[in-house]
Amino acid sequence: MKTCEIISVGTELLLGDIINTDAAYISKRLADIGVPLYRQSVVGDNAERLRECLNSALMRSDIVIMTGGLGPTCDDITKVVTAELFSLPLEENKAVRCSIEKYFEDIGRTMTENNLSQAMIPKGADILKNNHGTAPGVLICGKIGGSDSEKTVIMLPGPPKELEPMFEESVMPRLEAMSPNVFFSLNLHLYGIGESAAESILRPIMEESTNPTVAPYACEAEVRIRITAKGDSRAECVKLCYSMAQKIRGGEAGEYIFAESTSDGDYSETMVRRAIDLLREKKLTVGTAESCTAGMISSRIADIPGSSDVLCGGIVSYSNEVKINVLGVQADIIEKFGAVSEQCASAMAEGARRILGCDIAVSVTGIAGPSGGTPEKPVGTVCFGISDAAGTETETRHFGSLSDRGKIRRLTTSTALMKIIERISTKK
């Protein structure tokens, strides 16, 4: 089976100026098709260090995927270093040159001469068309000094909007042809249990099952159980995964499972998609009243295309005046119990349901920090309310011990979404 490494090129990655999303994206897609990824490396725009890094990777692995360093500036050295390693001259490709010239003509900008460096291609290399930019991808197959086997280097542009479609259109079909097996992954999403507790419950299954494999992953607001099967066909793998999922659902971990997703989806959207699916299934609408999250809950719902059929709206009631004058929270509730209280959260949820005309309303009010906490209500204290025709329920959570302001607000948003899921799930 072919083994693979990723080398991300760019000093900006080492400095932390940008987040390396390319490597995460490629890693996930390699896992989807069963190509073993052994290492990831990041190297700056330095020819000597890049040459050393690439040479070492090719000594270990069959395939090296490189991202970045294909642009028109002097620090874009990926093609030059790779061509030298394979002892290949760079030659201008007329078709690529014409494509670059047309790109600038279409956008109405004058092309500078340095852009033509992107048309210089290692002799004999395959060109991967860039439909979203000027830098083509490049694929080289051959031998380098000290290696008896053929190696493959795939060079891709760094910007994700260029890399991702190029990878799907030109790289994935080649890699799939190199992989002798089909892989499929099914994810079970758990809430209300930690990774270590989930692992303890699932350890007997994890130890006895080799195909499919079972592994827990800790996420910010949930635990994800990844079930991965290997087989000769997708249908075979799907059957293995769902059989294992049924076994897990029937055990102690089953009570914590709120959703499932496949490797084709976006794990980060599973919770909000589940909430929307349940709302649609029950033909219900939802609204929000948000203080400390300032619209994050309604924004998460609205991020999903088509969510307008379930989301009525949201009220950002950051100040006490808005809580009182818009949502109808009685002033004496805030005076007696405080804005961060279950009594206030209850009145906020009921006010939102009345004003927005929704079937279910969720409210949050809390202290996201870094200041504002008291011994009785420390930073990270959040009160929740959820209201529907059957009544209103409230709860207080504490997120502050190891959390910063951003994390507290994200955890609050996820908890509010789970409250919607739990509330609807109990309805007959």
Image (spheres, rainbow, N blue to C red):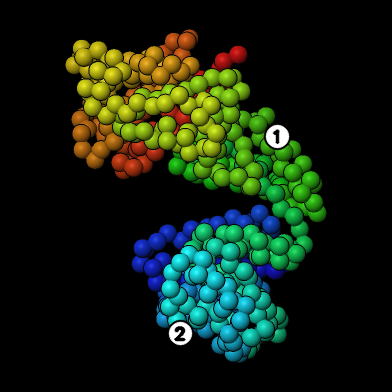
Judge whether residue 25 can be spotted in this image.
yes
Question: Split into 4 quadrants, where in the image is the C terminus?
Answer: top right
Question: Split into 4 quadrants, where in the image is the N terminus?
Answer: bottom right
Name the N-terminal-most of marks 2 and 1. 2
Residue 61 position by quadrant: bottom right
- Closer to the camera in the image, 200 or 94: 94
Amino acid type at mark 2: Glu
Residue 217: x, y in percent? 54, 46
Q: Is residue 168 above or below residue 56?
A: above
Q: Is residue 206 above or below residue 372?
A: below
Residue carrying label 2: 48
- Closer to the camera in the image, 22 or 238: 22
- Disc 2 crowd, CA 10 A, few/some/many (<14, 14-19, 20+): few
> In terms of secondary structure, where does tag 2 sit?
helix
- Disc 1 crowd, CA 10 A, few/some/many (<14, 14-19, 20+): few
CB contact under 8 Å: marks 2 and 1: no
- Kindly identify the residue that appears in the image at 59 percent across and 55 percent down: 28
Q: Is residue 59 above or below residue 251?
A: below
- Kindly identify the residue that appears in the image at 58 percent across and 64 percent down: 131
Residue 36: x, y in percent? 65, 63
Amino acid type at mark 1: Lys
Give the label on residue 247, or none.
1
How far is mark 2 from mark 1, CA to CA?
Answer: 53 Å
- Kindly identify the residue that appears in the image at 48 percent across and 27 percent down: 311
